[in-house]
Every structure is written in structure tokens, then in C-alpha cells.
Image: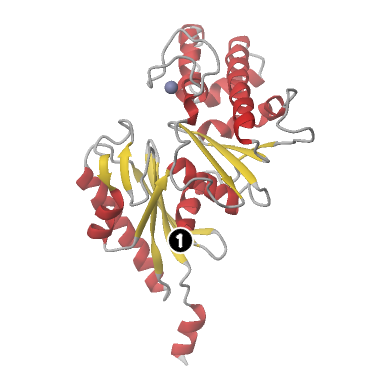
């Protein structure tokens, strides 16, 4: 009788998704059959020490394994989304200083050996687009492009639920030029979309306009700037107008390259972007084909897209 109950409730379609962000590392236990995050563990991202990084991952994985075992369920494996170029064997080429120790780093091999679990890995932007295409705004669309405005600009594109290439060749897509600037992006060029539309870029733009001297009582962050713009602040209006203009130019460039059916915008900055969506959706330019239409949408999976997309590598 007891044995029968166990068989009926056991879930073998579970996987752990790991999203390594600029400030936080998030692990989630995911039920792949319904695309739901059952349990989440969050910790500050360890950027300097490989051992500390692996120790944390292993202990968090162990916690999630125990949770699954308590419910008589088992986990297929763990998938990790990480910044930069990730080879098929799970070797990370470089994260460009984002995680100091990840240079020619055998991520999958190290996790499998140290944490005794099957592991997969891919570029984080590709993993986010996988999550959006399977479980988010990209569902029911064929050509899905996702822009993540986080610590870096993530660009991922997927067609019919599959990547066009097996390796992450488009992950530097945030470094397209959208105009002239009097400062350089960290990549060495000027006018990169990535340097203009992330939270750091928006805040830098406010600083150049003297925000701190003019509004010493207002905290300098994107949320405050967006709110001030909505309340008629003229400096905030100029900052937001530049932001929208740069992002729109970037969107048009991506449309010309990928012709997506839907472009989903996620990441921290996207949270306050609803009032500007209409302006971004204006596509009065020569289209890839006559009846071409694209939907510009904000992510509704929020922080779960990376976890869900990673876990879905075990689908
Ligand atoms: Zn750049």
C-alpha cells in the first residue's frame, strides 16, 4: 500500500537551474512537467574564489536534493547559465572579468566531480531565451529574441524552441553601436548599446547631467529616474528620452538581423519600462518583409527565466 503511494507521487521530472548573476546566484528546483520553480535558494555571487564558489553550489544542490528526496522524487541534474562563451563540453572560455576565476574554466567537470551530480551549462543569455520561449512571453511564438538588461546586456535568439547554433556566438550582441558618445564602453569601442541602456549607463548619464548636484535628496537609481520622468522632471525626461532612443535603435538593428516574432525585454531595468513600451514598439522603418510584425513585450517570468531556462536543458 505504502509502496503504491510512493510510485504515484514520485516525480522524476525535476532539475536544478542555476542563474549566476552580477550580484546574486540563484538556484531553483524546477518541475519540468509544469515549468514551475518549486524552491529557490539565493546567495551573493562569489566572484573571486573558485573553491568558495563550488562549495556554495554543492551545499545548495545538496539542500535541493534533500528536498526532492523527502518527497520521494529524484533530480535529473543541474544546469548552469553563466556569462561569456561556453563550449559544448561545459568549459567556460572567459567571462571577461565578471567572475575572475572563470578563465578556461572546466565548469561542468568541476561541478560533476565535486557535487556528484550530472551537470550541463550554457551562456546565460541563451538560457534566459530558452526559459522565455518555453514558459514565458515567447510561448506560442516561433522566432523569439530576448534582451536582458542586467549586469550586462544579454542577447539570445531561438527559433521553434531550438537554438540556431549549438554555441553562443551572439552573446556579444550588446556591443552594437547605436551612436556616438564621448566615453568608451569597457569593450574598447564607443556608442555600444550595452554601455547606454543598462542601469549603470542610465545612472552615469544622470551624473553627467548633474543629477547629484541638482537633486541631492533624490537617490540616484533607475527606479527614481523613471518615477521622476513620470512626474514631469525635465532632466529625467531627457535621460529617459535618450535611453528610449538608444534602445529603439538597438531593437531596430536586432529586427534587421533576426526578424523576431517577439522581442522580450527582461532584467532589472525592464521593471520600470512599461510606460515606454509603446514608443519602443514604433517600427516605422523598412521591414524584413512587407507584412512583418513584431511584438515588443516585457518579461513576466522576472527572475525565474534563468532558472527555468537552465533546468529546461534537461527537458
Ligand atoms: Zn562595448
Image quadrant where residue 245 sits? top right
Asked if the beta carbon under badge 1 is closer than 8 A to the nearest atom of ligand 1, the reply is no
Q: Secondary structure at mark 1?
A: helix
Ligand 1: give its quadrant: top left
Give x and y (percent) for residue 201.
Answer: 47, 20
Given residues 169 and 45, the one toward you in this image is: 169
- Relative height, residue 62 to residue 310 (above, below): below
Q: How is the image coloured?
A: secondary structure
Give x and y (percent) for residue 180.
Answer: 52, 10
- Specify few, some or many for label 1: CA neighbours under 10 Å numbering under 14, 14-19, or 20 or more: some
Rendered residue at 59%/49% (across/down)? 133
Residue found at the very far bottom of the displayed protein = 1
Given residues 57 and 112, the one toward you in this image is: 112
Give x and y (percent) for residue 164.
Answer: 53, 46
Rendered residue at 45%/38% (across/down)? 169
Q: Number of numbered discs present?
A: 1
Mark yes or no: residue 90 visible: yes
Residue found at the very far right of the displayed protein = 291
- Relative height, residue 257 to residue 205 (above, below): below
Mark yes or no: residue 219 visible: no
- Relative height, residue 34 to residue 152 (above, below): below
Residue under label 1, please give it.
314
Image-based side of 30 in relation to 282, left or right: left
Give x and y (percent) for residue 92.
Answer: 32, 43
Amino acid at each position: 500500500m505504502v509502496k503504491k503511494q510512493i510510485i504515484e507521487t514520485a516525480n522524476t521530472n525535476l532539475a536544478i537551474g542555476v542563474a549566476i548573476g552580477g550580484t546574486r546566484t540563484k538556484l531553483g528546483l524546477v518541475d519540468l512537467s509544469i515549468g514551475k520553480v518549486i524552491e529557490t535558494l539565493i546567495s551573493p555571487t562569489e566572484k573571486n574564489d573558485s573553491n568558495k564558489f563550488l562549495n556554495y553550489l554543492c551545499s545548495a544542490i545538496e539542500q535541493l536534493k534533500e528536498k526532492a528526496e523527502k518527497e520521494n522524487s529524484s533530480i535529473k541534474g543541474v544546469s548552469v547559465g553563466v556569462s561569456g562563451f561556453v563550449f559544448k563540453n561545459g568549459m567556460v572560455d572567459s567571462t571577461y572579468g565578471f567572475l575572475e576565476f572563470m578563465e578556461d574554466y572546466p565548469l561542468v567537470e568541476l561541478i560533476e566531480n565535486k557535487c556528484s551530480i550530472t551537470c550541463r551549462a550554457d551562456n546565460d543569455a541563451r538560457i534566459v531565451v530558452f526559459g522565455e520561449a518555453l514558459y514565458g512571453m515567447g510561448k506560442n511564438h516561433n522566432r523569439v529574441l530576448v534582451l536582458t538588461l542586467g549586469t550586462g546586456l544579454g542577447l539570445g535568439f531561438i527559433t521553434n524552441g531550438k537554438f540556431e547554433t549549438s554555441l553562443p556566438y551572439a552573446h556579444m550582441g550588446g556591443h552594437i553601436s547605436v551612436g556616438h558618445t564621448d566615453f568608451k564602453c569597457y569593450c574598447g569601442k564607443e556608442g555600444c548599446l550595452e554601455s547606454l541602456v543598462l542601469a549603470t549607463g542610465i545612472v552615469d548619464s544622470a551624473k553627467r547631467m548633474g543629477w547629484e548636484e541638482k537633486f541631492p535628496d533624490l537617490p540616484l537609481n533607475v527606479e527614481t529616474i523613471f518615477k521622476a520622468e513620470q512626474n514631469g522632471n525635465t532632466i529625467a525626461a531627457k535621460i529617459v528620452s535618450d535611453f528610449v532612443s538608444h534602445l529603439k535603435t538597438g531593437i531596430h538593428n536586432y529586427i534587421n538581423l533576426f526578424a523576431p516574432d517577439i522581442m522580450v525585454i527582461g532584467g532589472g531595468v525592464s521593471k520600470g519600462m512599461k510606460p515606454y513600451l509603446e514608443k519602443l514598439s514604433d517600427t516605422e522603418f523598412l521591414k524584413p518583409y512587407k507584412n512583418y510584425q513584431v511584438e515588443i513585450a516585457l518579461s513576466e517570468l522576472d527572475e525565474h527565466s534563468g532558472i527555468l531556462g537552465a533546468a529546461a536543458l534537461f527537458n
